[in-house]
Image (spheres, helix red, strand yellow):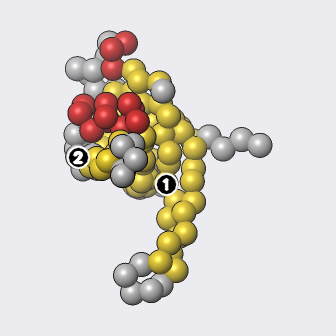
Amino acid sequence: MLNRIMLIGNIGKDPEMVITPDGTQVTKFSVATNRKVKGETETDWFNVVTFGKLAAICEQYLHSGTKVYIEGRLQQRKYTDKQGQARVSVEVVANDMKMLDSRATSEDNEYDL
């Protein structure tokens, strides 16, 4: 079985980091990807979550508008919202991130954890 996703897109808003009670760093952010369909541009949004060292790197270096390559796996989570409704969330659990902006072309900007 294979569960792998690769995205190239732009960060939607500055990443947000939290530290869990056991000390794990977790950073979440969104990535927008664009594609042309019948001459129109369509945008798909992906929620991305990173852990540990990669989470710290993403929180420090990524900002709204940054162009990135993200690789990871899709994860589905079930939860109950504030109104008591059952919800399902799909997110990308990233294990690789590369900044693709023109000012970020060196190997120092590739993070594979």
Q: Is 56 located above or below residue 46 in the figure?
A: above
In the image, farthest residue toward the right: 1
Q: Residue at x 48, y 27 (%)?
A: 113
Q: Amino acid at mark 1?
A: Glu
Q: Is residue 17 left or right of residue 39?
A: left
Whether residue 67 is visible, yes or no, is no
Q: Residue at x 39, y 32 (%)?
A: 54
Residue on which disc 1 sits: 91
Q: Is 31 located above or below residue 8 in the figure?
A: below
Q: Nearer the viewer, residue 8 or 93?
A: 93
Q: Amino acid at mark 2?
A: Asp
Q: CA distance from mark 1 to mark 2?
A: 17 Å
- Crowd rating for badge 1 (residues with CA inside 10 Å; few <14, some 14–19, many 20+): some
Image quadrant holding the N terminus, namely: top right
Q: Is residue 78 left or right of residue 33?
A: right
Q: Residue at x 57, y 53 (%)?
A: 75
Q: How far across and down, in percent of the image, does residue 12 sit?
A: 28, 50
Q: Which mark is residue 62?
A: none
Q: How far across and down, in percent of the image, does residue 71 sit?
A: 51, 35
Q: Nearer the viewer, residue 70 or 10?
A: 70
Residue on which disc 2 sits: 14
- Crowd rating for badge 2 (residues with CA inside 10 Å; few <14, some 14–19, many 20+): some
Q: How far across and down, in percent of the image, does residue 25 sit?
A: 35, 42
Disc 1, SS:
strand
Q: Is 93 located above or below residue 99 in the figure?
A: below
Q: Residue at x 23, y 46 (%)?
A: 14
Disc 2, SS:
loop
